[in-house]
């Protein structure tokens, strides 16, 4: 199911829902990647003036899942608000544009600084891999930098391949939901601990 709501307020999360923010410089193929994932199609030209939010339900490993995907404009409006909203990030650059790679590396640092209390899932994606003759960002170089950033790197082509993009979104979903669950677990014992402390004054409860 694909619904394309026009601009609306950022939502509250559901349990199996992951909110994905697609970020990166202009013209690297953010919309092409998103639309390819949602519709399997590559259209060629996309309106870059407006951001779009999509709600998408699909099946991953036989589980029904829901994704909310925000394809942001470049530069995005209200970046902090969006960064705090998201569970997972796709940071997209073009392998034909070294500046776009540098921008994405900076963006990764910005996101980590904004989300200092909690590490969200962040994937870096080099798009336009079909344009190998125009490649300016060698994969080895990108891998080396991205390894230092401690997040996975993928290369793909929105114009040529659907499967690679499907894999990226599914892996990002899995990573984001894993981190969401870990976070829930690390947060939930606190009220319990508080209640114990109240009753037993911080002492070990009698068995
Ligand atoms: N050759 C090639 N062109 C692409 C690819 N992805 C996007 N484009 C083109 O790059 C331009 C910018 O794409 P768009 O998705 O609008 O970029 P955005 O500004 O990052 O959202 C458009 O002309 C697309 O047709 C790709 O994988 N390969
Ligand atoms: Mg766009």
Image: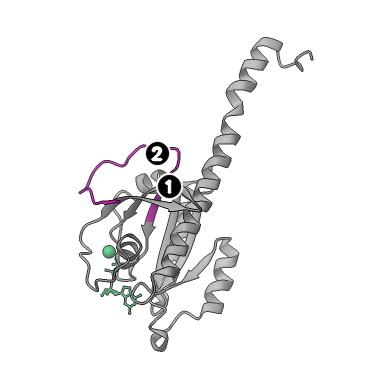
Residue 92: percent from the left, percent from the top?
Answer: 40, 66
Given residues 190 and 4, the one toward you in this image is: 4
| Mark 2 lies on residue | 13
Quadrant location of ligand 1?
bottom left
| Foreground of the two, 36 or 179 | 36
Residue that mark 1 sits on: 65
Separation of marks 1 and 2 at Cα, in angstroms: 12 Å
Residue 202 x/y as whole percent: 71, 17
Instruction: Say whether residue 191 is left or right of residue 57.
Output: right
Give the main secondary structure, helix, strand or loop, of the magenta stretch: loop
Which segment is the magenta one? 1-21
Which quadrant of the view contains residue 199? top right
Residue under the point 33% across and 65% down:
30
The furthest residue to the bottom? 133
How many neighbours does mark 1 have within 10 angstroms: few (below 14), some (14-19), or many (20 or more)? some
Q: Where is residue 63 drawn, in percent x and y?
A: 47, 47
In the displayed image of the protein, which residue is found farthest to the right?
207
């Amino acid at each position: 199911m694909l619904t394309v709501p026009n601009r609306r307020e950022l939502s509250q999360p559901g349990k199996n829902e992951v909110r994905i923010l697609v970020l990166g410089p202009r013209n690297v193929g953010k919309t092409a990647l998103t639309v390819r994932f949602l519709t399997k199609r590559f259209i060629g030209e996309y309106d870059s003036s407006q951001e779009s939010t999509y709600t998408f339900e699909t099946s991953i490993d036989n589980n029904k899942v829901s994704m909310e995907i925000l394809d942001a404009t470049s530069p995005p409006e209200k970046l902090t608000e969006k960064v705090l909203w998201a569970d997972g990030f796709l940071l997209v650059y073009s392998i034909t544009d070294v500046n776009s790679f540098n921008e994405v590396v900076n963006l990764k640092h910005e996101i980590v600084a904004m989300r200092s209390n909690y590490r969200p899932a962040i994937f870096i994606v080099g798009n336009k891999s079909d344009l190998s003759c125009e490649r300016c960002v060698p994969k080895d170089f990108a891998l080396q930098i991205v390894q230092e950033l401690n997040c996975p790197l993928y290369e793909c082509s929105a114009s040529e391949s659907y499967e690679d993009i499907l894999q990226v979104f599914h892996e990002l979903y899995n990573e984001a939901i894993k981190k969401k669950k870990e976070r829930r677990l690390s947060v939930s014992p606190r009220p319990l601990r508080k209640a114990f402390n109240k009753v037993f004054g911080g002492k070990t409860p009698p068995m």
